[in-house]
Amino acid sequence: MATEPAPTNPSKAGAPRVLSTNVAAPQPDPAGADRVSGIDKKPCAGISVFTPGPNYGDGSGVRGDVVGDSKHHGGAQKAVYAMAREELDFWESELGKTLPDGAFGDNLTTVGVDWASVIINQQVFVGSAVLEVSVARQPCRTFGAWLEQKGWMKTFTQRAQPGCYFRVVRPGEISPGDAISFGPAPDHGVTMGEAFRAKMGDKELARKAVDAGCLPAMYQEQLERLLR
C-alpha cells in the first residue's frame, strides 16, 4: 500500500507540477529501422497510466501510447517517462532548435523537478496515480536521428540529465497542472543521475548501484557484467 507523500529533496524552485501530458504520434523510425517510432509525443488533455506486462515488448504503461522499439522499450520498468521542461529549454539553447513538450519522448513534461536527483525506487505521487522511480534511459540511434544530431549519445551522456522512467504502483489519471510530490527517499541513496552514469559505463557508480542492490535483476546483472 502506498504511503502518503512527504516532502523530500528533488524539487527545484517553484511547486513541482506536470506541465504537459503526451502520447506518441507514430511515424517511421527516424534512424531508418523497419518499424514505427513513438519518440515524437504530442500533448493531450491527460493520460491514464497502468502496469503493462513485465518485459520489453509488453508496451507502454500509458493508454493510447506507442512503443516502436519493442526490443529495448516498454514493459513494467519503463511504463512512463518524464522529462523536465527546464532540460528541454537547455537543449533548445544548445541545439538552436525548438523542442516542444514531448520532444524527448516524454509522457510527462514537468517543471520544478530535478529528475537526476530523485532516488531509485522512490515513490512519486501525481494525479490519482502513484509512480516509482525505476531505471535509467539510454540514448539510442533513434533519439539522435530524431534530433538530427550526430554524436548525440555522447552529448546526452555528458549532460547526465536523463529524465526519469517509472513503474506504476497505483494506476490512475494524470493531467496537466497536477502537483507532483515525493515519498520518503530510500536509504541506499543511489540517484537517477548516478544510475544513468553507471549504465553508461562509470564503474565507480556501477559498484555503488550493485552494492545497493536497488535495481531490477536484469539491470543489476548488466552492471555486474560491466564490473567483471
Image (cartoon, rainbow, N blue to C red):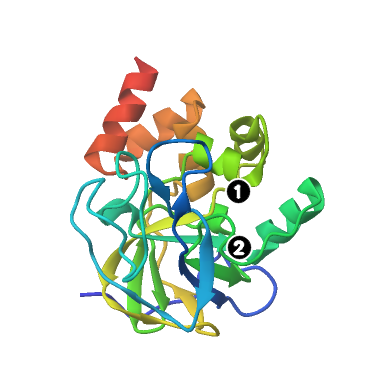
Q: Specify the label residue 84 is tagged with.
A: 2
Q: CA distance from mark 1 to mark 2?
A: 9 Å
In the figure, 228 relative to 174: above or below? above
Disc 1 on helix, strand or loop?
loop
Q: Quadrant of the C terminus?
A: top left
- Coordinates of residue 112 in the picture (x, y in percent): 63, 71
> Where does residue 223 sit, x and y in percent of width and height?
36, 28
User: In the rendering, at what x and y percent does residue 188 appear?
Assistant: 38, 48
Picture disc at residue 129: none
Q: Are marks 1 and 2 in contact (CB under 8 Å)?
A: yes
Q: Is residue 202 above or below residue 196?
A: above
> Left or right: where does residue 202 sit relative to residue 76?
right
**Residue 32 or residue 212, whichever sits in front:** 32
- Residue drawn at (43%, 77%), measured in percent from left and top? 6
Quadrant position of the N terminus in the picture? bottom left
Image point 62% across, 39% down: which residue?
156
Q: Position of residue 113 (x, y in %)?
A: 59, 66
Residue 218, quarter of the rendered image: top left
